[in-house]
Image (spheres, grey):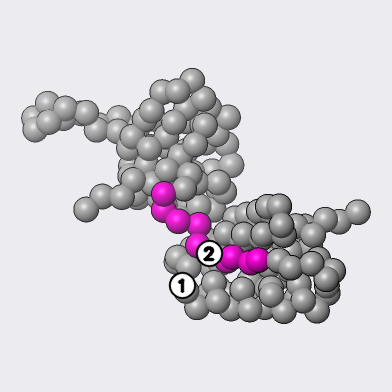
Amino acid sequence: MITETEKIEEFVEHFIKKTDGLFLIEVKSAPGNKITVLLDGDKGVTIDNCTAVNKALYKFIEETQLFGENNFSLEVSSFGVDRPLVLLRQYKKNIGRTVEVVLTDGEKLEGKLLDANEEQIIIEQKTGKGNKMTTKTTTILFNQIKHTTVLITF
């Protein structure tokens, strides 16, 4: 049997197909029918994107009486830069940016994301300063990664 969360995922996936570059990261359901939908986009996510998804999804939930007569709360938001990357599409979107990769053994690596495919990512790491600066590329398999976050640089 399909769950309420799966029905919401299906609806959102279908709805955002019409929106260039948007994709669903996650639908979370908490006690009390609190639904949180996290979106990302190849070119970012706007407030208008979130509002459109929220309105359409709210109407869908009401019309299908997904939660019967029970109340529900709905939040649709962008993934946020402080959250770890989840999908390969997010890694590809962030090629060229500086990332911090925490490995399953706890080691932290920082570098510029150069490439990502189904099996691995490649980062460029710089060490030292001035004339003594060295650059190396490091290949990291996805099964070695605990999580990866984009570092914000100013």
Task: Choose top left, top right, bottom left or bottom right for residue 17.
Answer: bottom right
What's the distance in space between the residues labelled 1 and 2, CA to CA? 9 Å
128, above or below 87, in the image: above
Magenta residues span 73-82
Task: Identify residue type, mark 1.
Answer: Thr
Circle 1 crowding by C-alpha within 10 Å: few under 14, some 14–19, many from 20: some
For marks 1 and 2, the one nearer the N-term is 1
Is 97 included in the stretch rendered in magenta?
Answer: no
Q: Nearer the viewer, residue 4 or 20?
A: 4
112, above or below 125, in the image: below
In the rendered view, does 117 fall on the left or right side of 101?
right
Which residue is painted at 58% across and 75% down in the image?
19
Mark 1 or mark 2, whichever is nearer to me: 2
Task: Identify residue type, mark 2.
Answer: Ser
Res. 75 mark: none
In the rendered view, does 73 fall on the left or right side of 20?
right
Q: Position of residue 106 (x, y in %)?
A: 45, 23
Whether residue 7 is visible here, answered yes or no, is yes
Circle 2 crowding by C-alpha within 10 Å: few under 14, some 14–19, many from 20: some
Count numbered badges in the picture.
Answer: 2
Q: Secondary structure at mark 2?
A: strand
Which residue is painted at 37% across and 42% down in the image?
99
Q: Nearer the viewer, residue 78 or 68?
A: 68
114, above or below 93, in the image: above
The residue indicated by pointer 2 is 77
Q: Nearer the viewer, residue 150 or 123?
A: 150
Which residue is painted at 48% across and 68% down in the image?
45
Q: Position of residue 27 (x, y in %)?
A: 66, 56
Query: Majority secondary structure of the magenta segment?
Result: strand
The residue indicated by pointer 1 is 46
Q: Position of residue 107 (x, y in %)?
A: 41, 23
The quadrant of the image that shows the N terminus is: bottom right
